[in-house]
Image (cartoon, helix red, strand yellow):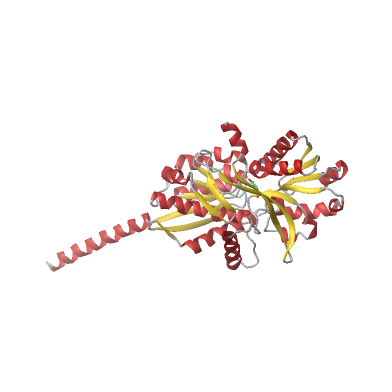
Amino acid sequence: MRRRTFMRAAGAAAVTLALSGAALAQETVKIGLILPMTGPFASTGRQIEAAARLYMQQQGDTVAGKKIQLIVKDDTGVADVTKRLAQELIVNDKISVMAGFGLTPLALAPAPLATQAKVPAVVMAAATATITEASPFIVRTSFTLPQATVPMAEWAAQNGIKKVVTLVSDYGPGIDAEKAFTGAFTAKGGQVENLRVPLANPDFSPFLQKVADAKPDALFVFVPSGIGAQFMKQFVERGLDKSGVKLIGPGDVTDDDILNGMGDVALGAITTQHYSAAHDSPENKAFVEAFKKANPNMRPNFMAVGGYDGMHLIYEGLKKTNGQGGQALIDAMKGTSWTSPRGPVSIDPQTRDIIQNIYVRKVERVNGELYNVEFATIPNVKDPVKAAKAN
Ligand code: DHB
């Protein structure tokens, strides 16, 4: 009798243990954050990971009663690796969301997996306009190059610039920037010559020699985040800083991660973008201060704000679905609006792209450090490529 009671009790305990194990497993929501943490684009990975961890530190790791687990993977900037990591995270780790995606090819490679597995993918960095069209499960908290660039063309046309040479990295976002600038600037009567430089190990000098020979009013530049310092060094070596050619472009070339190290050559550069560490708002002051405190010697750039807002979008979505992923989660994210460190933002329910202010900025020295100081705002800008298709 006693033995049987014991067996029954032990059996009940085992069932309880198994149940609570299952309950515990269900209660964890896993986010797979895939980023270039090494290689030439490691600054993007470093910025986004730091911002995602800051968000979790501030907001806690429980949402809708579920424990949030962040799994960070290094794709080294290679698209095949991103795809393999996404597959492993979906199949083995059973993630509810994937996020990160430091460059356009790294966002496109896992898009079919997001669709097949119905796992939402939050693009926090990559910025070619078409990315959100690669899967109905992709949502974006970074920006698109046409969104950031059309205001640059308009500013240039309104400010006495007539002849421009464009110099862009020869892949998705660079081609987007080139086309958006050329289209909008020539429509206002401007003249443009287009040059493209390889993405990998770029040598800018032969292109900069062409710019020196063409003597345009301005040089429009797009290089991905982290590469601007290399460009600036060669710009000075070619003597272009003393040639009177104005430097303009989307804000990637003067990104906050490297801007302060560029020196006086960057002073006066005019760029258009959605984020500056110098953005004057209480939300941004708090963000920059907390980011610097958690990451000494780092200043948040536009990649960091994409990561921080991406985590916010995931948290808000999970609150609405009570922790459920899949179709419910991507649907819950559509139309979400909030006040970001960059200003007011919302997720366009039609395109799953972010609608945000674009600011015109000038590099200035503030308290001894270089910043992109905002001086004009174009409010609530949608990706113009998709807006044109919708009309
Ligand atoms: C992309 C990458 C960047 O670092 C950037 O600043 C803009 C766009 C991209 O590959 O999409």
Residue 236: x and y, percent? 83, 54
Residue 253: x and y, percent? 72, 51
Q: How many marks?
A: 0
Q: Residue at x 39, y 56 (%)?
A: 64
| Quadrant where the N terminus is found in the figure | bottom left
The one nearer the camera, 266 or 86, is 266
Q: Image quadrant of residue 149?
A: top right
Residue at far left of view: 1
Residue 87: x and y, percent? 50, 46
Residue 203 in view (yes/no)? no
Relative placement, left or right, of 203 versus 16 is: right
Residue 254 in view (yes/no)? yes
The one nearer the camera, 123 or 12, is 123
| Quadrant where the C terminus is found in the figure | top right
Above or below: residue 267 compared with residue 207 = below
Q: Residue at x 75, y 62 (%)?
A: 365
